[in-house]
Image (cartoon, rainbow, N blue to C red):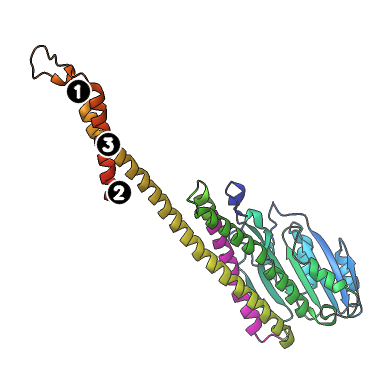
Amino acid sequence: MAKTGKAGRHRRRKRRTPVGAAPGTLIADPAARSTQFDLMLVAPDKCRTIRNATVTDITANREDWPLMWLDCVGLADVATIGEIGRLFGIHPLAMEDVINADQRPKVDFFDDHVFVALRMVDDASLNRYEQIAVFFGEKFVITFQEREGDPFGPVRKRICADGPNRLRARHGDYLAYALIDAVVDSYFVPIEAVSDDIERIEDGMLGGPQKGQMQELHALRREILVLKGVLWPLRDALATLIRNDDPFVTHETKVFLNDTLDHAMRLIELIETQRDTLTGLIEMHLSLTQARTNDVISLLTIVSTIFIPLTFLVGVWGMNFDPDVSPWNMPELRAYYGYPAALVFMVAVALALFGYFKWRKWL
């Protein structure tokens, strides 16, 4: 799962509201996707979906259905988004947080609705996440996401499934819980992929460190740090949602939110374990690499040590002294078996040194 090239280092440039702008000012990001609204109308015994819904569709059906879910994909059309906010009485500061999609996961409580900002897995292979903003009151749920693609498919199927179910029978807080729970559970996929990568690298390192393993380990560690930065505030936001005594979050829904909080805690425990494992693997890789370097240096030193006396002997016997001038000038040059004797002597010296190194356990 870990990517090590430019794709694995995707960084999003954060866009901020201009300094001095009035609170609640909505300014679209030039790179924002075009806006599309999907409206799901929910009743205990039926449901209806309107694709590419308009503000007229919303106002025409709002009073006729006990619950509606408006899903907004793309944040380019700030005029219509602002109109949606005014229609449902959403606080302007919360709408500004929707457009400035770099918020820390949080929960804000207002008089007639609750605002939850989360980070959602957008593309795990690129280590990229997007903001999902959830507004809910007694009779409505509104979600704002930056791009197409979300983990809400099972929730949509449950709403439209035949027979009675809790998603159609309860109010907006339970539907919001189901969406938040889907976002939290979607993190298990990239975290399990990281675990698989860690096990693969660990198994490979048992046979010795390989080129590229350190780069993969650092890429995984960077991914874990991103996940940690997302999940810790997510846990705090869920805890705030559960502990706050808000009339729009019933006691029955808080029981289910507690289960989602348990999932978030489990995810945090997993990434903490993975971070410790990665730290250990990085240290082990460095130790193994250093050990291999030391072995190479030791081998080269031993080879050099063996050849030093041999080089000395060759140098001595290679001096150009004429034995005819003096009997002290290299008399070995006249020996009948001088050349093979010299070779045997040098081999004996090399073997003796080799045996000594083995005896001292240097080899």
Q: Amino acid at mark 1?
A: Trp
Q: Amino acid at mark 2?
A: Trp
Residue 317's disc number: 1
Q: Earlier in the sequence, mark 3 or mark 2?
A: 3
Magenta region includes residue 333: no
Label 3 with label 2: CB-CB less than 8 Å: no
Q: Which quadrant of the structure image shows residue 195?
A: bottom right
Task: Pick whichever, 93 or 259, lies toward us.
Answer: 259
Q: Main secondary structure of the magenta part?
A: helix
Residue 168 higher or lower than 298, as above or below: below
Q: Report how far apart the C-alphas of labels 3 and 2 lie in the structure.
A: 15 Å
- Which residue is rendered at x = 64% and y = 65% of the image? 22
Task: Pick whichever, 350 or 96, lies toward us.
Answer: 350
Q: Earlier in the sequence, mark 3 or mark 1?
A: 1
Q: Secondary structure at mark 1?
A: helix
Q: Secondary structure at mark 3?
A: helix
Q: State the count of labels.
A: 3
Task: Pick whichever, 207 or 13, lies toward us.
Answer: 207
Closer to the observer: label 3 or label 2? 3
Residue 222 visible in this rendered orientation of the protein: no
Image location of residue 21, percent across then percent down = 62, 62
Residue 238 higher or lower than 204, as above or below: below
- Which residue is rendered at x = 50% and y = 60% of the image? 278
Task: Write down the residue under mark 2.
Answer: 362
Image location of residue 248, percent across then percent down = 74, 83
Task: Write down the residue under mark 3.
Answer: 350
Magenta span covers which residues? Answer: 219-246
Q: Determine whether, in the image, residue 275 is placed left or right of residue 260.
A: left
Q: Report how far apart the C-alphas of labels 1 and 2 lie in the structure.
A: 30 Å
- Which residue is rendered at x = 73% and y = 63% of the image? 145
